[in-house]
Amino acid sequence: MTVPDRIIPDPTVVHPLAEHPRVVLLKPLITDPRVQVGEFTYYDDPDDATAFQTRNVLYGYGPEKLIIGRYCAIASGTRFLMAGADHPTMGVSTFPFTMFGGAWTEATLDLVTGMASRGDTVVGNDVWFGYGATVMPGARIGDGAIVAAGALVTGDVPPYTIVGGNPAKPIRARFAPADVARLRRAAWWDWPVELVTEHVRTIMAGTPAEIAAIAEREGLARPAE
């Protein structure tokens, strides 16, 4: 089946819905090299969606990266706190003397640079963030996960798991372990966009077995882990 290019959304356009400027695709919008976002991941915000990398990626003072996969849906108010938000806890005070310069910086810079980092924050593909979710530094969120509105993610979230609360805890798995394995092997988000378009209805409403069958038939299935 051939799909005309003109009916496939363009992943290079910041505003994919001209009548809804509150929706932006993040990949063509991001300029900070420490923030990496895959194709078709979007952010929805009625105030200023184009300010995502300054209003929603906070405390990015260090080398740590925020890596977000493809086809993620990020609701208004979702924030990613980076490692620069960490304060020293090795002694009596947590006050960040170092940031104010002068003698304070000279006396304490080695303490801050020697602090252990929580590392990059990594979000998989096809992840849905509900309104006002917060992700703490170094969290890793698996493919197909759902982060409920208002959730505070402080650690890792397994693939295809719904989490919610403060701190976020698993609510339920979306699929059985065998089906999760099938979906991760199929990795539909890595398919050519023409193939995604051809099977978009199955991706939205089909079963893991149906997605796996398409990947096998097209020779796109990953080796079993």
Image (cartoon, grey):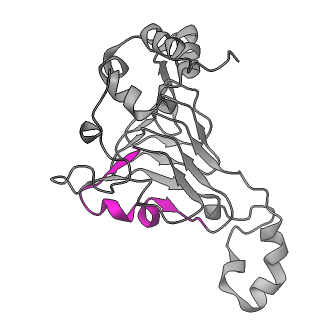
Image quarter of the N terminus: top left
Confirm whether the magenta stretch covers residue 52: yes
Confirm whether the magenta stretch covers residue 122: no
Image quarter of the C terminus: top right
**At x 30% / y 39%, what residue is drawn?**
5
> Magenta residues, as a range?
40-60
Against 169, is 28 above or below? below
Q: Nearer the viewer, residue 54 or 97?
A: 54
Indicate the position of residue 129 as horizontal and vertical percent values. Answer: 41, 40
Q: Nearer the viewer, residue 131 or 107?
A: 131
Quarter of the image for residue 34 reads bottom right
Q: Nearer the viewer, residue 122 or 147?
A: 122
Asked whether the viewer can see residue 188, the reply is yes
Indicate the position of residue 53 as horizontal and vertical percent values. Answer: 46, 62
**At x 26% / y 62%, what residue is drawn?**
47
**At x 40% / y 26%, what residue is drawn?**
195
Q: Furthest-left residue in view?
A: 19
Indicate the position of residue 151 as horizontal and vertical percent values. Answer: 45, 40
Against 33, is 180 above or below? above
157 vs 64, left or right, is left
Indicate the position of residue 157 as horizontal and vertical percent values. Answer: 57, 32
120 vs 213, left or right, is right
Asked whether the viewer can see residue 147, the reply is no
Against 177, is 132 above or below? below
